[in-house]
Image: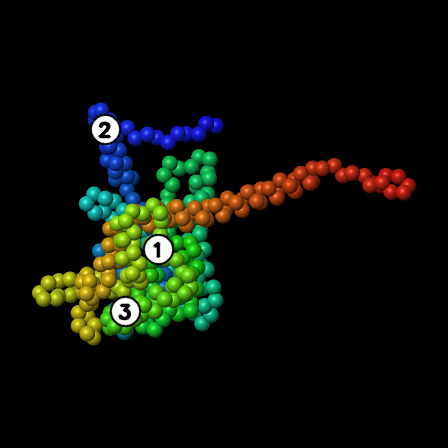
Amino acid sequence: MAAIAEPQKMNLNGYVGFDSITRQIEKKLLKRGFQFNVIVVGQTGLGKSTLINTIFAAHLIDSKGRTSSEEPFRQTTEIQTVSHLIEENGIRLRLNIVDTPGYGDQVNNENCWEPIIKYIKDQHSAYLRKELTAMRERYIQDTRIHCCLFFISPTGHALKPIDIVVLKKLSEVVNVVPVIAKSDSLTMEERVAFKQRIKSELAFHNIKLYPYDSDELDDNERALNERIKQMIPFAIVGSEKNVVIDGKSVRGRRNRWGVINVENEDHCEFVHLRDFLTRTHLQDLIETTAQIHYEAFRSKQLLALKETSSKQHEQQQQQSQPVQPQVGPGGPVI
């Protein structure tokens, strides 16, 4: 087969029009809409539902938190998926939110992360089955998890041993973004020290978090990713309620030190997290899921399938071979 020569750059003598391809792609994508799947993981009572509602500025998932001491304690007992179709300036986004039971809540927490890992892998498996179908759909319904928000309890000390195990397991199968929940319970000094200890532990245990390094990134993208890595884990506060600050109604909450404005960068890093998830890295989260996590799963499954098929073929060949008579001292023995 002849090698394909390197293409030569040519100057056009007139306008052709193929520069409109980006508008053509945009038009098709807008008609189809977009999809984003996020899973929230963490111990009970860290405000997982509230943060999702705060990020997307809508009540998408019911909070399990109590509004008064008289209310009974509620918690998620099984993995639950909530789907919403939201629209902003003509852009439609199908948002799937996967809420998980608080891990580490039981007396025996051995392998408590397995249902979460299994759920993520099951979505890869379902997509692979549809992809390998002879008469597959034109647009396969994508339930693969694009982002895992991992909630860290604001202890101010260090990651718990179970946090390290779960983070390591999750980072192998999904894009993990860690956040320090309810960070307003820490002073600014405590927050800085806590974040530094978490960074050191993540590096020590070689836990790879999103965003990842890539040769395909340009200088601006590398610089942006570096700023994000310096900020991780995001110290956040979530709130669906409005409070009045200097006569202006803002999303926030009151604590023993005063009023926390969720969207004030001096109070918490919620704005940086929201912009990261929705304004700068939404598409990259989706692509990274397909190109890294799903591709690794797909390759492993197809190699295992090939190996199984080879073994079955060998067994069939052995079974189909005629039995050769053994020759004893007195003649053939059947």
Instruction: Give the x, y percent position of residue 148.
Output: 35, 56
Q: How many marks?
A: 3
Say which quarter of the image contains residue 80: bottom left
Determine the secondary structure under disc 2.
loop
The alpha-carbon separation of the residues under discs 1 and 3 comes to: 21 Å
Label 1 amino acid? Answer: Tyr
Q: Residue furthest right?
A: 330
- Quick one: quadrant of the C terminus? top right
Q: Are marks 3 and 2 in contact (CB under 8 Å)?
A: no
- State the mark number for residue 210: 1
Say which quarter of the image contains residue 261: bottom left
Label 2 amino acid? Answer: Gly
- Neighbour class for label 3 at 10 Å: few (<14), some, many (≥20)? few
- Residue at mark 3: 192
Instruction: Give the x, y percent position of residue 91.
Output: 23, 44
- Residue at mark 2: 17
Could you tell me if residue 304 is visible in this image?
Answer: yes
Label 3 amino acid? Answer: Val
Name which of mark 1 and mark 3 comes first in the sequence. Answer: 3
Residue depicted at 46% across the width and 49% down the height:
297
- Neighbour class for label 1 at 10 Å: few (<14), some, many (≥20)? some
Determine the secondary structure under disc 3.
helix
Q: Nearer the viewer, residue 52 or 216?
A: 216
